[in-house]
Image (cartoon, helix red, strand yellow):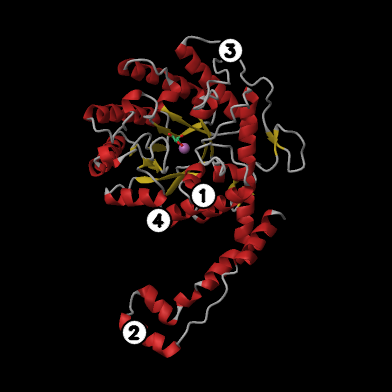
Amino acid sequence: MTTYFPNIPVIKYEGPKTKNPLAFRFYDADRVIAGRPMKDHLKFALSWWHSLCGDGSDAFGGATMDRSYGGLSDPLKIEKAKVDAGFEFMEKLGIEYFCFHDIDVVPTDKTFAETRENLLEIVDYIKGKMAQTNIKCLWGTSNYTRHPRFMQGASTSYNPDVFAWAAAKVKNTIDATIALGGQGYTFWSGRDGYDTLLNTNLELELDNMARLMKLARDYGRAKGFTGDFYIEPKPKEPTKHQYDFDVTTVLYFIHKYGLEKDFKLNVEVNHATMAGHTFQHELRVARINNALGSVDANDGDLFLGWDTDLFASNIYTTTLAMYEILKAGGFTNGGLNFDAKVRRSSFDFDDIVYGHILGMDTYALGLIKAQELIEDGRIDQFIEDRYSGYTKGIGKKIVDETVSLEELEAHVMAIGEPVLSSGRQEYLELVLNSIIFS
Ligand code: XUL
Ligand code: CO
């Protein structure tokens, strides 16, 4: 059998002290943390697009990576080789899920009817591989950035024929996702946004964006899809103002259009920082609204500022992220999808392996540290104590909404100036450091 990663053995846990680059330092799949094995907390997923399709090209230059899979030229053979390579990769790394776009798995230069046929053929091929492994589909999505017909948006295009194209693609991708047993379908807005309001009917575009989501929901449910629909926030790129700006904006949208029973958030690290938020902020907002669905696990480069999709290497980010995910009760249908790519200069196939080992270890250590943070309890206790005024007296009346403005005025006259206590940020950062570095 052809191997695409001949230098790569099955990657095993060897512990933090190992010097073996092809081993995990922290990811120990079956180690139980807070009552569940690490692999169930983390639910790592391969992103088909970055790892199997990405060729290193960027806005400034062409491909640096050979993705012909051994010099193949027949497009369908390449797609099948990608499946073979992807499954070999996932088995060697112990990754149990994958995410895909429609255009990641089929040749992209065909008619709509040919593309649909190809999709059915490749889905069957993937199903065959799935039957021999325990690898599952986390979620599917449709791409509407690549083709020029979507240059002015997909469901938000001024042109209803473009809306129809977007809808037809969504239908086929939902069919493929259901066929693969996927438990999620993600909407990432592509070019749904605007560059200037001088040519844009903002109200109609947002209404239409919701209309396609309602059609997708009704179609998916009618076809027996029981998983979650996700919306993935992103503030900009490629448009100046993407409609799914951040978690708060998407929550407003979900509620305005009555989508809250079926739609959750797929929160991406790099998109959070592009919106001027920490990843923890975005996860917290999703969590307190019971809308945390899944995560695109990457990292941004704060100096560059654009969507760099780096593999995660920042333990602070992953510790505070896993803290939010643990507090949310963990993933149900969602997981950690590596929407991350190796740098353009890391052009060997083996670099994708190092990227995933880095990302998996960074999230595994984040999980370990997040659980230590929770068990340590000092930060949670600090917050509980800080707000304890709301559990008694006038504070409780405010929370219970049994107080009037007159009563609050009388309270002020009785107490004079409030007695404040320190927010202790530096102390809390010291506690966080002491846990991360212990
Ligand atoms: C785009 C992005 C996509 C989505 C899936 O910035 O993050 O990879 O995650 O379409
Ligand atoms: Co993403």
Circle 2 Cα neighbour tier, 10 Å, few/some/many (<14 / 14–19 / ≥20): few
Distance, label 1 to label 4, CA atoms, is 16 Å
Q: Which numbered circle lies on residue 407?
A: 2
Distance, label 3 to label 1, CA atoms, is 39 Å
Q: Position of residue 123 (x, y in %)?
A: 42, 22
**Taking the image as four quarters, which one is ligand 1 found in?**
top left
Instruction: Look at the numbered disc 3 and say if its residue's Cβ is closer than 8 Å to ligand 1.
Output: no
Circle 4: element type: loop
Where on the picture, by quarter, is residue 409?
Answer: bottom left
Instruction: Look at the numbered disc 4 and say if its residue's Cβ is closer than 8 Å to ligand 2.
Output: no
Q: Position of residue 119 (x, y in %)?
A: 39, 20
Q: Circle 3 is placed at which residue position?
A: 70
| Residue type marked 2 | Glu
Q: Circle 1 is placed at which residue position?
A: 279
Q: Position of residue 142 (x, y in %)?
A: 38, 30
Residue mark closest to the camera, 3 vs 2: 2
Q: Position of residue 62 (x, y in %)?
A: 53, 21
User: Is disc 3 in contact with disc 2, using a CB cutoff of under 8 Å?
Assistant: no
Q: Is residue 98 above or below residue 286?
A: above
| Residue type marked 3 | Gly
| Residue type marked 4 | Asn
Circle 4 Cα neighbour tier, 10 Å, few/some/many (<14 / 14–19 / ≥20): few
Q: Circle 4 is placed at which residue position?
A: 289
For image coordinates 67% across by 29% down, the residue present is: 10
User: Is disc 1 in contact with disc 2, using a CB cutoff of under 8 Å?
Assistant: no
Circle 1: element type: helix
Q: Earlier in the sequence, mark 3 or mark 2?
A: 3
